[in-house]
Image: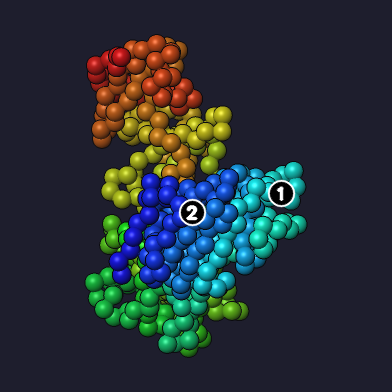
Amino acid sequence: MKKIVVSILALLVLPISAGATADALTFAQDTNITVGSVTLVVRAGSLVDDMVVNSSNVVFTLSANSILVIRSNDRFEISNDSGIEFICSSSYSEMSISGTTYGTSVIVYASSVVCGISSSSGTPVISSGGGGGGSATPTPSTPSVPTTTTGEVTATASGGGKTTLTTGESTTAAVELPVNAVSASTDVKIEHKSKGPITASRPTPSSRTIVGSYVYDYTAISNGSSVSSFDQTVTLTFTYTDSQIAGLEESTLRVFYWKESTSQWVALPTTVNASSNSLVAETDHFTYFAIMAVTEGEEESRVAEETPSAEVVEGDLIRNPNAEGMAQFDIYIVKLINGKKFKRLILSPHVFESYEHFDKNGNGSPWDDVLDVNQLTMDEYTDSDLIRVVGGTKVYQLIPSGDTGVKQWLNITGEQFISQGYDGDSIYEINATDRDAYTTGADIVL
């Protein structure tokens, strides 16, 4: 189906109409519209049939696939003719619509009434959209979550999303995305596929048996592109029947995912609820998932496992053992300062062992003190490449390359340092061994 991408420039002319072609308006980016004296933002990823902007209102025409998210950065009430609720937070107000739940058209009115906050803490609340600009007393609540039972759902940044797929074996596979797991509207889909063709090219661990007849293919598409990872962890839930686990050890049930980079099935930390025959696991990406268990009476041999992230504090050493390539061996030291999070790569084992304080347990093996974390945790920390030697005054910028690298002196003034966007909080103090692992390159001058 042909779609028309609305540009900001096009919205400068009023009124606007694209004709009532199904899903004719796709908003590729946040787009400002002016209604009376009020500026509203149609969020990126919104999809409607038609939009007409008038002097005191804007009319949206909707269909089954429509997705509409409207925000006011001025925190004005999102008044509308359908009484649709909107989120009121300390920094914005926002209304979300999916499909035709509220009818095939919605009128949003110009309102200059600032929405309320439930308390001085700034807790977000849900407020009624009223009718024609009327206001209502806000009550604490949570955003509406797009929810389906078809195995397909369009998740949004403001509401997340949840869908459940029922198989021919009367079992289910589900996923729930929290708020801000995605940054734009994302089509999420679960498919159950016969395990034979899948495992023919993706063999399961020798000690594990797939429960039931299916492997589950989870996918996510946003703006035509596959979503490889999420900004928040998402929750997977699977159910199984007693007959499916006959002859298997129920306590060994785990959710596994197929890891392309290492061509192996990896076990996720899994909560087994034997009373409800359900499994719950968390992940930050989609791929093939399967339920596996060990045959009764057999010894549970070791398999690849996804390690949950530990709590990280100042000075901790972290790595992601499930990263691709050599990155899984990279160890970083964490720095927390002024509310900022930094990590710096330890160049080599020789450099690592030169820092005696890394051995926090005092057992002579600092390697035991390295925390295994997932990629979401790694991404919380900004990479730092600025250092100075303990007792020194020169600040260097580092360029690592394997177990060696280059250091370049920032031969600039303090004013130039700031103007170039360098952050003084990110500077690490290192020892002489660490310094000497880098060869000296040309000075950085302006």
Horizontally, residue 14 falls left or right of residue 95, namely: left
Residue at image position (55%, 66%) is: 106
Pick the quarter of the image with the C terminus.
top left
Residue 108 spot, x, y in % from top left: 57, 59
- The kind of residue tagged 1 is Ile
Element on which disc 1 rests:
loop
- The kind of residue tagged 2 is Val
Q: How crowded is mark 2: few (under 14 residues within 10 Å), some or many (20 or more)?
A: many
Write down the residue under mark 1: 117
Residue 297 spot, x, y in % from top left: 45, 79
Classify residue 294 by image quadrant.
bottom left
196 vs 337: above or below:
below
Residue 339 spot, x, y in % from top left: 56, 33
Write down the residue under mark 2: 42
Q: How is the image coloured?
A: rainbow
358 vs 45: above or below:
above
Element on which disc 2 rests:
strand
Question: Residue 148 or 332: which is nearer the viewer?
Answer: 148
Residue at image position (43%, 56%) is: 16
Pick the quarter of the image with the N terminus.
bottom left
Question: Residue 41 or 401: which is nearer the viewer?
Answer: 41
